[in-house]
Amino acid sequence: MFLTFPIMVIRVNPIEKIIEWRWNNLILVGAGSFLISMVWRYMIERKDYGTRKAEAGEKSDQPPLIQRVMKDKRIYTPFLIIVALFACIFPFVFSMYQTNILITALIYVMLGLGLNIVVGLAGLLDLGYVAFYAVGAYTYALLNYHFGLTFWMVLPIGAGMGTLFGILLGFPVLRLRGDYLAIVTLGFGEIIRLILENWNEFSFGPSGIAQISRPSFLGMDMSVHGAIIYMYYIMIALCLFTIFFVNRLQDSRIGRAWIALREDETACQAMGIDKAKTKLTAFALGATWAGMGGVLFAAKTTFVNPASFTIWESIIILCIVVLGGMGSIVGVIVGALILILLPEYLRAFSEYRMLAFGILLVITMVFRPGGIVSDVRRIYQFKGTAETKS
Amino acid sequence: MEPILKVQNLSMDFGGLRALNDLDLDVISGEIVALIGPNGAGKTTFFNCITGIYPPTEGDILITPPGKKTKRINGIKPNKVTERGLARTFQNIRLFPNMTVLENVMIGHHCRMRAGILGAILKDRSTIKEEERVVENSYQILEKIGLSDFVNEFAKNLPYGAQRRLEIARAMATDPFLLLLDEPAAGMNPHETEDLDKLIKQIRDKEGISILLIEHDMKLVMSLSDRIFVVDYGKKIAQGTPAEIKNNKAVIKAYLGEDIDA
């Protein structure tokens, strides 16, 4: 209230050299902050109550809503079918603009799931993830420009290039952890971007590469509209593939090793896990997905330039993972949809976008430190092991 | 009998500080050996040298797994040491807190498993079999240790004593021939310590795993050990059976200080 006082209440009128006192605003600010603090206190108290109950050993009879839905097959299966149907008919019901936005969101779902391997599972804070994305995008752009290679040929190559760069970056950073790792990866991301920006002969500098061909379907030429719909289905298929892939990995020997690495590096090594190898796999796999995402991005926009691969992209992808719930597939998908779709539909408030992101993150971290959807993986694990036992 | 672990002239320098000085130690198959000494004597450093966390400055660490040749394991990586059959626990509990109890033990099996990325994705028959075997095996270990009620609990939610035992279970899952326990009874009440006493004997007798432990609880040490090594300021000051150690002048001096009248 005191902080806002000079802005909200006093208004200097420089022309007439008088000071206007707007006492009405004072009341509004007062009431507003009172309300906000009430809600805040209430939420904090509810949270504390929850923790106290958990500490007292009482099993809360009602797990969080999302988990209840996830557990209950009767709700879960129809829900999944509805989502699937909706996804199938989406491009025919909604406009091209909407489809385009959703394609972008799906690319971010893929990127989020890829980064989730590195950050969420293996616990390696990677702030330069966008570098691999750029590598993928430029792989397609350059190969298409120079040699005319098509999308389907380049998709595996882009993924491979991602892997290669992931391993290249992985080697020097094997010894680092936590903050140091974050800074090195941040630097790596900037290096890639700066190279693309300044090495004119190679990457055509800031002006980028235009007229990249869209994915073709059995060599047919498609209208722009058809190409977008086709792109949309490619995205859906690849996302499903990614989900399948990550889901299988999570509960495998390698997935467990990643989580152990996140939890305690020393103990993990003492249990016979090769730290270097495990870290490298995580980095390489994460980068593979970024590389694929890059190829898709280049194919979708048909134009790449270094401005698309700034540090902000890395941060947004990281936000998707953190906000959605580290290590949780559903969480990352939800996070990606929220963070990518909301700004699109709230274009009117675009000036406040960063502010809203910040507030959203702070609120999530205070009330749900595990992300919007956390713990899902472990519930699944519970069931799996219980079944094996009985 | 050939010792399964033989440490010769082991020294470890941290810069100018000599933490371990010319230490000898050996463990014979089927033995429970205790390593004791006042705080800061270098016991944990000794463990860290053996398990590869620090490469020792001088000396040899030789292991002879049952039915295999003697090997020198100086300065190889911790995970390789574990692969060779030496498993350890930590002084301050280092479980994987956000994994379930079962998963913690399954991690212990990691170096005995073969499944790779492709196996995880394709879920071929050998991978599925391996997973099943590991789940089954982990559950059996937990049953032996007495933690089977907690299988699906998060490791961080276990009571303290159970966390200590889970560490032992996890180490046992790596299928070792020698178990290195770093203060397994630290922070336990007398009742829990008694259970631990039984458990350790049981591991030795039923599983045939030899044990080297660091411990401050003298009652436990005297009851468990076949032989005791005493270190102080990184040097070995005595070794022998519990009865011998009890009456050893040097040991009493290290623990209680010198008698003024003497």
Image (spheres, coloured by chain):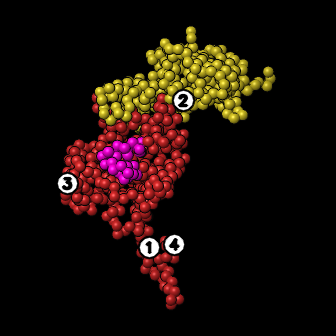
Chain colours: A red, B yellow
The quadrant of the image that shows the C terminus of chain B is: top right
Toward the bottom, the furthest residue is: A16
Q: Which mark is residue B77?
A: 2
CA–CA distance in space, label 4 to label 2: 60 Å
Depth check: B115 or A189 in front?
A189
* Residue at mark 4: A2
The foreground one among B112 and A74 is B112
Provide the secondary structure element on which disc 3 rests.
helix
Q: In the image, residue B199 lies at what x, y percent?
A: 47, 22
- How far apart marks 3 and 4 lie (CA) works out to 54 Å
- Residue denoted by label 1: A29
Marked residue chain, label 4: A
Disc ID at residue A89: 3
Crowding at mark 2 (Cα within 10 Å: few <14, some 14-19, many 20+): many
Does the magenta run of residues contain A138? Answer: yes
The residue stretch that appears in magenta: A137-163
The secondary element bearing badge 1 is classed as: helix
Residue B82 in the image, given as x and y percentages of width and height: 50, 26
Task: Looking at this view, name the residue that lies furthest to the top.
Answer: B1
Q: Chain of mark 1?
A: A
Pointers 1 and 4 in contact (C-beta within 8 Å): no
Instruction: Name which residue type carries label 1.
Output: Val
